[in-house]
Amino acid sequence: MIYLLLNFFITFDIFFILDKQKTLIKTNITYHFKLHGYGLINSYSQLFLSNSYWFAAFIILASFIDVYVGFYGMFSLVLTNFYAQILNYNHHSISKGYYGFNSLLVGLFIGYSYAPSWQLFIFSALASFLCFVLTIVIAGLQANKKLPYLSLPFLFTVWLIILATPHFKSLIDSESSIFIYNDLMKLGGSDMVNAYHFYDSIELPKIIDVYLKSLGAIIFQYNIVAGLLIVIGLLIFSRIAFMLSIVGFLSGYYFFILLQGNIGLINYTYIGFNFILAAIAIGGYFLLANSYSFLLVIIATPIISMIIAASATILGSFGLPVLSLPFNIMVIMVLYFLYNRVKADKLKITKVQLFSPEKNLYRFLNETERYNDEVYIKIGLPFYGEWNISQGQNGAITHKNEYQYAWDFVIKDDDHKTFRLPGTSLEDYYCYSLPILAPADGFVVNIIDGVDDNLIGDVNLQQNWGNTIIIKHTEQLYSKISHIKKDSFKVSLNDYVYKGQVLASNGSSGRSPEPHIHFQLQSTAVIAATTIKYPLSHYVTKVDNNYQYHNSGIPLENDIISNAVSNTLLKNAFHLIPGKKLHWDINMNQTQTNQNWEVFVDINNQTYLYCKQTKAIAWFVNDGTKFYFTTFEGNKNSLLYYFYLSAHKIIFTYYQDLTVTDSLPVYEVFKPISRLLNDFILPFTNTLKAQYKLTYASIDDYLYTKNMVLKSSVSLKSLLTTNKQFEAEIILNNGNIQYFETHFKNRTIKATCEVI
């Protein structure tokens, strides 16, 4: 029954149907059935900080080894999700199991602790409601501190139940664990009894026996069979979580032995599951898994041993069990401790939770590679066209010490000269009197004017900077341009200027033996302020007539450099604003279909493409200089997924043979079986890489472009091999995406686009 139920739910990739505002369309019985089905499945997986349906299946099977325990757990869970829906709580939270997993634990405890009766049935329903209320209250209180509520609602509910039990005569202690063979006979006959007896009677080393039973104890199933089912599910779900569970358990267990502690707390109550849950939580869920998080687990689990011993002493005097209290204390304490750091470098808190240690880490590694050079304020070059860097940062002439982070720009001809003959006057120099541009938006906060240009070879040391303008872009970020031509300013003090706006003309005033632009970034508006190291953005360098695009970086001395000039066709084709609709006629291996995409924006102001037919979603960013995808969710056999791969990053500039490279998240392109071995070593090193490459194949006209062809590919790299996995061609025409063709393994997809 559980297997069939699970398979039914897995056939649905996404149960949310989105309208134009990305709200839920409630489709009567079908919608509610899916809502509670997903809520049930995810509540089980939430016990191990997961959202894996397959892992949930193993947990469900393990919870029903003692059928009464499993029944009361599921009963409490289902009731709680109905409470949440009837009381108009967030449906997304219901479907993700956020409300239900604590009530599931309460139900499992009730099923394990008390003999079945109709009174217990009512009592369980009320206890579920109490747990739901406590979940809302505790979650709200913890959210103010950015801390999780974990299983605190379960703990408080169970303690209240235990304290109340002596006053209710109908609540009778259960003996079902003694007669578990009878339950198994009713559930699956003699075959199930024999199978259970075989596995539970296996003589294992003590440490393995206790580890497996500790896993089962999480769902109040104190037997090897439950532990085996959970450990198999855990291994399938996450190799990192599996390793952490072992490291955490061994660390805590052997600390008890080392100090000659009361090992009975671990060996007979199986309270060691606190080691396992805490290790998974702090080692790879709330924190990114790495060597430091593993070290933290090794340090933290002995402290959990101390908390277990202390809690047993305190709670024992009230007749209360320790349960998962040490796990809650340790995780909340560690997170609170880490949140208050000034700098997070070694132990990194997961910013976007993907409910998988592997996915969390793969995403972090990908984003570090993709966005490591991203800056909020993008500073461009202060000129048109191609210039040469005559003196770079830490240059040999004047860019030294506190003034080292600066550039001098000139224009050179093919003979590497900065002037035309005879080169004796200012007008002979190629860059003289050319316009100077604002490198970014900002306020003009300082101007010096009135300094005459020097004769060629002369310098003005008394007015070192010459005519200068300083622009404030944000707090502690100013740009300064010096050696400007006298009386050429087009702007005034306190003016607001826009990126690319003409400010003045280039000259040779101040300490300038020949015309050039001195450009630097600084943290104050003072003319003689020291320089700061800050990257330039969206520029192109030229080497041997080949162009290389730089999203951000520090250009070097002798580089030939220019701003990346935007191409109107590229900007218009990928100008995907909310409300824009794309209709695709698709030929996939001779099969004709069509799909409709629409652009939406979510509550976090993130734009995304949504395919109505496949329910696939692809989030993207358009910052005015480039278009790039960030995340994909849904059907990986959809056209949108192939487009996500093909147009992963598009720069809005065209240079012949320009190549753009990028990386994709490993978990989005490698199959799980291909990642298997890498997952085990991922916290320490990564051997897999998905490399994206885009080339600008052809164009009809550089100035008035109407047609352009882009070609892209995705290559999968492992330690020993590189395989081109995917190739695509995108044709742009008259401001729109016109045609898209992909080749993936033995599949060819051709699609024609029409903007509705």
Image (cartoon, helix red, strand yellow):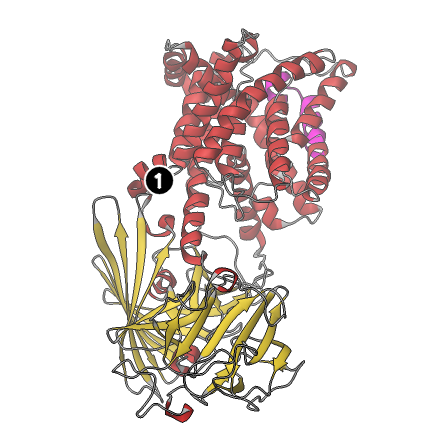
How many discs appear?
1
Helix, strand or loop: magenta stretch: helix
- In the foreground, 620 or 22: 620
Instruction: Name the image quarter holding the N terminus.
Output: top left
Residue pictured at 45% horizontal, 66% vertical: 399
Question: In percent of the image, x 41 and y 48: which residue is there?
Answer: 365
Residue 153 part of the magenta-drawn span:
no
Residue 223 in the image: x percent, y percent?
Answer: 47, 16
Q: Secondary structure at mark 1?
A: loop
Label 1: few (<14), some (14–19) or many (≥20) C-alpha neighbours in 10 Å: few
**Which quarter of the picture shows residue 326?**
top right
Which x, y percent locates residue 696?
Answer: 29, 74
Q: Image height check: is 456 above or below 750?
A: below
What residue is rendered at 64% in x and 24% in y? 325
Q: Which residue is mark 1?
A: 685
Q: Position of residue 353 (x, y in %)?
A: 52, 46
Residue 112 inside the magenta-drawn segment: yes
The reply, left or right, for residue 717 in relation to residue 175 is left
Of residues 228 and 169, the one drawn nearer to the viewer in this rendering = 228
Q: Which residues are magenta?
A: 110-129
Asked if residue 219 can be seen in this view, the reply is no
> What residue type is disc 1 on?
Thr
Rendered position, 421 above or below 464: below
In this image, 42 relative to 574: left or right? right
